[in-house]
Image: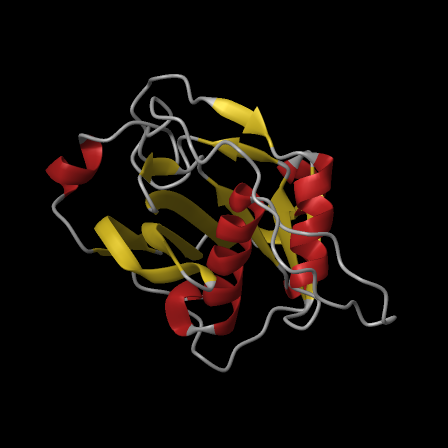
Amino acid sequence: MRRLFIIAAAVALLAGFGGCAGRARGGAPGPGTPQSATPTATASGTPAPALSDRAAIYTAMLRRYLTTSDHSFGADHRFPIAYVLDQTDSAAVNPVPSGQPAQRAPISAADQTAIVAALADVGMVRFISDRKTVIEEKDNCQQVRGGGILIILAPPVAAGDRVEVGIHGFVACLGATWFTYVVVRDGTGWKVTGTTGPMAIA
């Protein structure tokens, strides 16, 4: 798969941010206290787990990313499966290595269950603990097996009812994105309002 590598900001700007695959943003805490939301029904009709703030933020991000052209494969493209790393990584948004260690933290089992249930209408979403388990190499190019996508999320950086969260989506050696979403809470919940900072597409 051949794709153009586009840097939406100068390389010098990108290099100024931390992380081997993203900007280091782990110093600030994300939303902390879980806040219950109205549960939705699963396909079987049973109530889905209520979303904590963190799970609701990640759900909004993943829904936007997987159902729009943000993943760079076209607005109508749907992946047969989306693998999501079960721990956040502060280096999830920058393709330029910084040499600094990334900060990682697990996504709780409860949040994983809630996110998967909330995205049941989007397609198959599965949390994994090791990215190597879903990567294969063909023609000297690493890619996600089964035509899927691997997604790595950064920890939310909070500023009141607004958070910035890095996301890295990897499909193949020439098919990946790195950028930061802006997610805002209003009266109906958390919603993605756009992006901020540098963006890279391979």
Residue 109 at x, y percent in the picture: 73, 37
| Viewer-nearest residue: 61 or 163 | 163
* Count of marks placed on residues: 0
User: Residue at (23%, 31%) from the top-left corner?
Assistant: 17
| Viewer-nearest residue: 141 or 184 | 184
> Looking at the rendering, which quadrant does residue 41 occupy?
bottom right
Q: Is residue 202 visible?
A: yes
| Viewer-nearest residue: 86 or 13 | 86
Q: Is residue 138 visible?
A: no
Residue 15 at x, y percent in the picture: 20, 32
Residue 50 at x, y percent in the picture: 68, 52
In this rendering, the answer to whether 131 lies above or below 202 is above
Left or right: 89, with 182 as reference point: right
In this rendering, the answer to whether 34 lies above or below 151 is above
User: Residue at (36%, 53%) from the top-left corner?
Assistant: 183
Residue 172 at x, y percent in the picture: 51, 55
User: Residue at (34%, 44%) from the top-left corner?
Assistant: 163
Q: Residue furthest bottom?
A: 76
> Looking at the rendering, which quadrant does residue 21 occupy?
top left
Left or right: 193, with 40 as reference point: left
Left or right: 175, with 22 as reference point: right
User: Residue at (35%, 56%) from the top-left corner?
Assistant: 202
